[in-house]
Amino acid sequence: MKSLEELMAIKAKMQDKVSVRTSSGDIRIVVGMATCGIAAGARPVLNAFVEGVSESGLTEKVQVTQTGCIGICQYEPVVEVYEKDKEKVTYVKMTADKAKEVVEKHIKGGQPVTEYTIGASQI
């Protein structure tokens, strides 16, 4: 970075990603980012949700955030989706590709991807 213009360009590029994490929309996506989650691959999952929400233009409606251990480490990476007036949906053993599918089908389309939920997993 050699100029103020370059710095401003970086800021503009990253602004959507920051607003996704601080939005107060109707939907909140929480990714478990404790040591167990990170070791299982939660960081690419978090990034995929941030990018998917941003690219879909849903930054006003959806907040993507992280939390510590959710308590079901054997199912990491774990993602919980909270929507107003709806029951929480818990996704388990997530990947970046699954996260993109959840953004398309659940966040944009309104239909949870049941095969990735804790209720569908073989306990």
Image (cartoon, grey):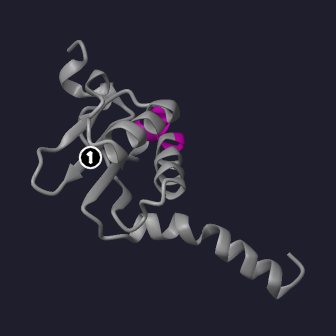
- Crowd around label 1: few <14 · some 14–19 · many ≥20 (10 Å): many
Image quadrant of residue 77? top left
Name which residue lies at 44% across and 64% down: 20
Name which residue lies at 53% across and 64% down: 17
Question: Against 55, is 88 above or below?
Answer: above
Query: Residue 3, image x and y in percent?
Result: 87, 84
Q: Seen in the image, is 20 located left or right of residue 8?
A: left
Query: Residue 37, image x and y in percent?
Result: 41, 38
Name which residue lies at 46% across and 54% down: 53
The amino acid type found where label 1 is placed reads Val
Quadrant location of the N terminus in the rendered image: bottom right
Image quadrant of residue 105? top left
Q: What element carries label 1?
A: strand
Q: Mark 1 points at which residue?
A: 81
Query: Residue 74, image x and y in percent?
Result: 31, 25
Predominant secondary structure, magenta span:
helix
Query: Residue 114, image x and y in percent?
Result: 25, 26
Question: Against 62, is 73 above or below?
Answer: above
In the orientation shown, which residue stands out farthest toward the bottom?
Answer: 4
The segment highlighted magenta reads: 36-44
In the orientation shown, which residue stands out farthest toward the top?
Answer: 122
Q: Number of numbered discs present?
A: 1
Report if residue 108 lies within the magenta region. no
In the orientation shown, which residue stands out farthest toward the right?
Answer: 2
Name which residue lies at 32% across and 40% down: 106
In the orientation shown, which residue stands out farthest toward the front?
Answer: 109
Residue 94 or residue 109, whichever sits in front? 109
